[in-house]
Image (spheres, rainbow, N blue to C red):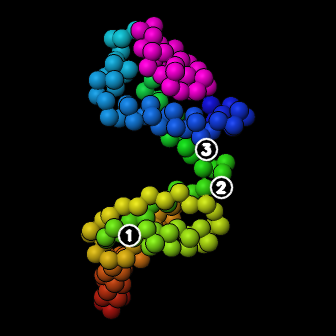
Amino acid sequence: LFSMALKNSIVDSVEEDLAGIAGLLMHDEQFKTFLLSPYVGREEKLKIADKLFSDRVTALTMQAIRLMLTKGREEELLPLRDEFVVLRRKHNGVIFVTIASAEKLTKDQEKQVVAKLALATGKTIEPSFEVEPKLIGGIRVSYENTVLDGSLRGALNALRDKLYHDVLIQR
């Protein structure tokens, strides 16, 4: 799906289509139950999918949905969306970064953090900002297999670990 979207220069459109379908699956319990029900036949699922999506999504996305329904792989729609996003990021040299702070950052602070991360990694940053009061202060940045903990909670945990280590060495 990704390679065909890339070939046809419709990566963003297909990603939006998949995000919309994923949103519908996650937030509409009735649709999710219908789509994932083993008691509803393939033909009926295909007919409903055509009515719901054929005029709202790209032809490529519709073709993928039809194929998944035909093959009985409707439960793979969310993982398909997730993997599509991973492939798009990899292709564009983008990394997804989760930035957690004790309080909501201002827009200026968000821009500064993103700029520093882009400079440090040499890649384009796709950020997600979260508020975690338990951090007490500072920020924690997570991306790929890396966690940069500049939070007060992280510093206290590191201090605690060092004290434990020092006490154990003295025994």
Under circle 3, the secondary element is helix
* Camera-nearest residue between 72 and 94: 94
Task: Identify which residue is drawn at 45% across, 15% down.
Answer: 51
Q: Is residue 36 visible?
A: yes
Q: Is residue 63 magenta?
A: yes
Depth order, front residue of 30/59: 59
Q: Mark 3 against mark 1, which lies toward the viewer?
A: 1
Badge 3: how crowded within 10 Å, few (<14), some, or many (20+)?
some
Disc 3 and disc 2: Cα gap in Å?
Answer: 10 Å
Q: Which mark is residue 105?
A: 1
Identity of the residue drawn at 33% across and 67% down: 104
Q: Quadrant of the N terminus?
A: top right
- Report the Cα–Cα distance between label 3 and label 1: 29 Å
Give the percent coordinates (x, y) of residue 153.
31, 76
Amino acid marked by disc 2? Gly
Residue at the disc numbered 2:
93
Query: Which residues are the magenta region?
Result: 43-71
Left or right placement of residue 120 versus residue 133 in this view: right
Is residue 131 located in the magenta-colored stretch of the structure? no
Residue 168 in view: no
Residue at the limit of the structure toward the bottom, as seen here: 170
For marks 3 and 1, the one nearer the N-term is: 3
Hey, what amino acid is under mark 1? Leu
Label 1 SS: loop
- The answer to which image quadrant residue 150 occupies is bottom left
**So how many labels did they put on this image?**
3
User: What's the residue at 61%, 44% (across, down)?
Assistant: 87
Disc number for residue 95: none
* Residue 35 position in % (x across, y down): 38, 20
Q: Earlier in the sequence, mark 2 or mark 1?
A: 2
Three-letter code, disc 3: Leu
Q: Which mark is residue 87?
A: 3
